[in-house]
Amino acid sequence: MIDNDKKFSKKVAPAQSARMVETIYGCKWSLTVYQLIANGINRPGQMVKSVDGLTTKVLNSCLKRNIEFGIIDKITYNELPPRVEYEVTPFGEKFIRILDQLETLQEEINESV
């Protein structure tokens, strides 16, 4: 017997994760930064040299935002001259897999149009 009197609560979108996805897609360089790190390019100078149109100022802003979200970690080495590298966090790996799934979904949508 089906209980037709069951009440459901309103389903609400996950605000924080939705904001993260929106912010990352809104930053046209974040996906490129993830690609660079995945290919072993993890120093800011290397990143700027590897991508036409990417400036140090824009890169620093992008990296800062990703650090705040916990997607990327900044590693500072106590050396002279100073050396800084970036790596994807375990949380960032999960987040990037979700972005990859969204990209796959978009490809499927494009194919069906």
Image (cartoon, rainbow, N blue to C red):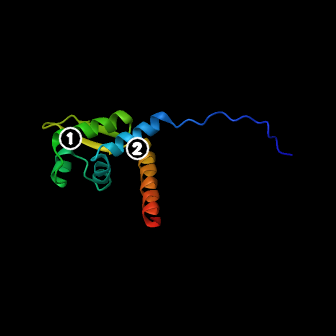
Foreground mark, 1 or 2, reads 1
Quadrant in the rendering for residue 2: top right
Q: Secondary structure at mark 2?
A: helix
Quadrant in the rendering for residue 64: top left
| x and y percentages locating residue 107 in the rendered image | 42, 61
- How far apart are the two marked residues, 1 and 2, measured between alpha carbons? 20 Å
Q: Residue placed at 51% from the left, 36% from the top?
A: 14
On residue 29, which mark appears? none
> Does residue 11 appear left or right of residue 88 in this picture?
right
| x and y percentages locating residue 62 in the rendered image | 27, 40
On residue 58, which mark appears? 1
**Up-down: is 64 above or below 112?**
above
| x and y percentages locating residue 104 in the rendered image | 44, 59
> Does residue 101 appear left or right of residue 79 in this picture?
right
In this figure, what is the number of numbered marks?
A: 2
Amino acid type, label 2: Gly
Residue furthest front in the image:
113
| x and y percentages locating residue 75 in the rendered image | 28, 38
Q: Which residue is mark 2?
A: 92
Crowd around label 1: few <14 · some 14–19 · many ≥20 (10 Å): some
Amino acid type, label 1: Val
Residue furthest bottom in the image:
111
Q: Residue placed at 27% from the left, 39% from the top?
A: 63
Q: Secondary structure at mark 1?
A: helix
Q: Residue placed at 21% from the left, 34% from the top?
A: 78
> Does residue 20 appear left or right of residue 47 in this picture?
right
Q: Nearer the viewer, residue 79 or 105?
A: 105
> Does residue 7 appear left or right of residue 29 in this picture?
right
Crowd around label 2: few <14 · some 14–19 · many ≥20 (10 Å): some
First reached walking from the N terminus: tag 1 or tag 2: 1
Q: Nearer the viewer, residue 92 or 5?
A: 5
Quadrant location of the C terminus? Answer: bottom left
